[in-house]
Image (cartoon, helix red, strand yellow):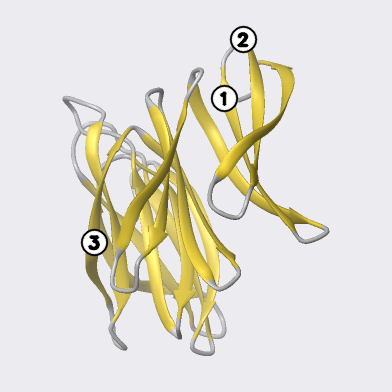
Amino acid sequence: TTPISPRGALHFYMNGAHYLAVGDLYDKAASNSKIYRWTGARFSEFHSFPTMRARDWEYFEIDGTSYMVIANYRDVIAYAVDSKIYRWTGTSFTEFQSIPTIGAVDWEHFEIDGEHFLAVGVAGSRSHIYHWAGASFVDFQFFTAQADTVTCEHFEIDGMHYVVQAFKAWSSLTVIYAWTGTLFAEFDAIPFHYIS
């Protein structure tokens, strides 16, 4: 079966093959999001994940091992649902770690000086950054949200690392944080009107 209400497609390349992940935003119950593998002529279903209104996917690698994190937005009752990290076993993705999130909308993996981080944008509340501690991700830092986060993005300029957080509000600031060597500190804020 195909996702009922697809959202958050991601292409990634793993072990010599092309894949397409498609999240399911179906809002009536838990549903299955899918990964499709390129056969040379088309994409065919490869793997299925139980998700709750999945908004985003992020594929990344650590020390040669492949991972996939899925942003679970909410269930039929509340926004406080765990997002899941899956690890590639060689034949399939299996659940590796569960991270408490409240209305997760966006995941971003990035690396600074060999250290791995995951940033998650959420609906209101606090957006968090997690740090790879060698065997799992641990909570590293949080940013207070002005409104529902639309996206969080990492970028680098002249060797400096930044994370930007954009909000869904009629009038808000898109906040840029700069890496100080030990944490992210607010660096700049750009006024914006409604981002969708």
SS at mark 2?
A: loop
SS at mark 3?
A: strand
Q: Spatial distance from mark 3 to mark 1, Cα to Cα?
A: 27 Å
What amino acid is found at the position of numbered circle 2 in the picture?
Trp
Q: Quadrant of the N terminus?
A: bottom left
Q: Spatial distance from mark 1 to mark 2, Cα to Cα?
A: 9 Å
Q: Does the residue at mark 1 contact the one at mark 2 (Cβ under 8 Å)?
A: no
Q: Earlier in the sequence, mark 2 or mark 3?
A: 3
Question: Is the residue 112 above or below the residue 83 in the image?
Answer: below
Identify the residue shown where x is 33% and y is 36%: 73
Identify the residue shown where x is 54% and y is 52%: 182
Which label sits on residue 126?
none
Identify the residue shown where x is 73% and y is 17%: 191
Q: Residue 185 placed where, x, y %? A: 60, 38
Q: Residue 93 placed where, x, y %? A: 29, 74
Q: Spatial distance from mark 2 to mark 3, Cα to Cα?
A: 35 Å
What amino acid is found at the position of numbered circle 3 in the picture?
Gln
Which label sits on residue 97?
3
Which label sits on residue 167?
1
Q: Quadrant of the C terminus?
A: top right
Q: Quadrant of residue 44?
A: bottom left
- For disc 2, the neighbor class at 10 Å (few under 14, some 14 to 19, many from 20) is few
Q: Residue 121 placed where, x, y %? A: 46, 38
Residue 154 in the figure: left or right of residue 88: right
Residue position for label 2:
170
Question: Looking at the image, which residue sits at the far top?
Answer: 170
Q: Earlier in the sequence, mark 3 or mark 1?
A: 3
- For disc 3, the neighbor class at 10 Å (few under 14, some 14 to 19, many from 20) is some
Q: Does the residue at mark 2 contact the one at mark 3 (Cβ under 8 Å)?
A: no
Residue 1 in the figure: left or right of residue 185: left
